[in-house]
Amino acid sequence: MSPDKKFVSIIIPTYNRCDIIGNTIRSCIEQNYPHDKFEIIIADNRSTDNTRKVVEDIQKESPVPVIYMFEERQGAHHARNSAAKLSKGELLYFTDDDMIADRDLLANMTKLFDLEYNIAVAGGRVLPRWEFEPPEWLIKYFKDGTLSLIDKPEKLIVANYDIGIYSCHQMIRREILFECGGFNPDIAKDKLIGNGETGLNIKILAAGYSVGYTSEAVSYHVIPRSRMTQRYINSRFGNQGNCDSFTTFRKKENSRKELLKMIFFAHIPEMLGKYSRSFGRMLIGRDEWRLDRAMAHYHFRRIMTDLKFATDDQWRGYAVKHNYLEG
């Protein structure tokens, strides 16, 4: 075994992306990191395409262990949590099936865990790899977390607050993941149902650990034409609204009366105001209408999520769990 290197399990949840996941896996195999010090786990989240065969073909030629597992329960958080239980790594690196890892990613990100700052979770830069030339308005307003992009100017950040680390490019100490109850509910197919890695990071910080960021750990997010549309941006803002409602409820466990007040006196007026303003700005040719329209969808999802919390006792109980590793 190679000395002075931590063993890493790379975990990739996937759903019906057999046409691109091979690129993600190969970029992980080609890491400038000792091949006896990491493994790759593909968590197939009920794919109905050719995903398994793609993985099996790569297994035959890979110098690194590539493990295939099938997660029957729909939802990326189920796939991540189940793969974590199968993992052998001291460190778990989570990425997505539309990411391309820089060759030095593991080498640079693992260095954070050698620092004397009690770091439990770390991230790095996520840069775009456009499949087509993006429209000007997308670059102007949404070249940020809307597209899961991160490009902070600092070379190193260590903090005891949320600095915005996404599960497409996130490394966690395995023992801390289990101590903190795993990933919170996340995406089922294309719909966000909880606050995923945001919720997990909040639990990790509440337990007294730090988060880290290094600009030297880089991954590339492949962005197809389908994600360069207003419709996609609206859906992303809607998912964020859902996430924020979930986070707020976990923190405050709002009463039904409080939730209804927020719906009628905050979110509905905001939604209607943003939607109306978007039409006015569109008519006079101002591209800010795109931000207003996206924010209208944000508030619509907050309305729907808060309404669910106000009317569904089972969902209220599920939303405030600590441990999601068991389902």
Image (tube, rainbow, N blue to C red):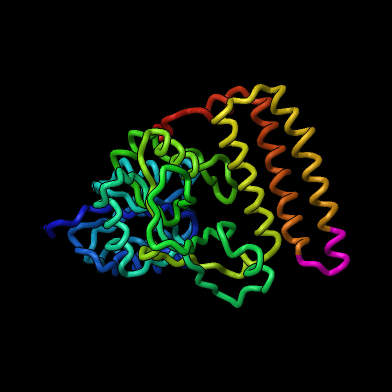
Judged left or right of residue 253, residue 277 is right
Image spot of residue 282 (x, y percent): 83, 64
Q: Relative to residue 202, is residue 214 depicted above or below? A: below
Taking the magenta stretch, the answer to whether it contains residue 286 is yes
Q: Relative to residue 151, is residue 71 depicted above or below? A: above
Residue at 60% across, 47% down:
191
Judged left or right of residue 325, residue 138 is right
Taking the magenta stretch, the answer to whether it contains residue 220 is no
Judged left or right of residue 298, residue 146 is left
Image spot of residue 178 (x, y percent): 33, 36
> In the rendered view of the protein, which quadrant contains the N terminus?
bottom left
Residue 30 in view here = yes
Foreground residue among 213 and 261: 213
Residue at 48% across, 59% down:
49
Residue 71 in view here = no
How many marks overall?
0
Foreground residue among 243 and 163: 163
Based on the displayed image, in which of its 4 quarters is residue 111 positioned? Answer: bottom left
Residue at 41% across, 38% down:
205
Foreground residue among 167 and 117: 117
> In the rendered view of the protein, which quadrant contains the C terminus?
top left
Image spot of residue 105 (x, y percent): 33, 64
Instruction: Tell me which segment is drawn in magenta.
Output: 279-287
Image spot of residue 203 (x, y percent): 43, 36
Judged left or right of residue 28, residue 230 is right
Residue at 85% across, 52% down:
276
Foreground residue among 129 and 286: 286
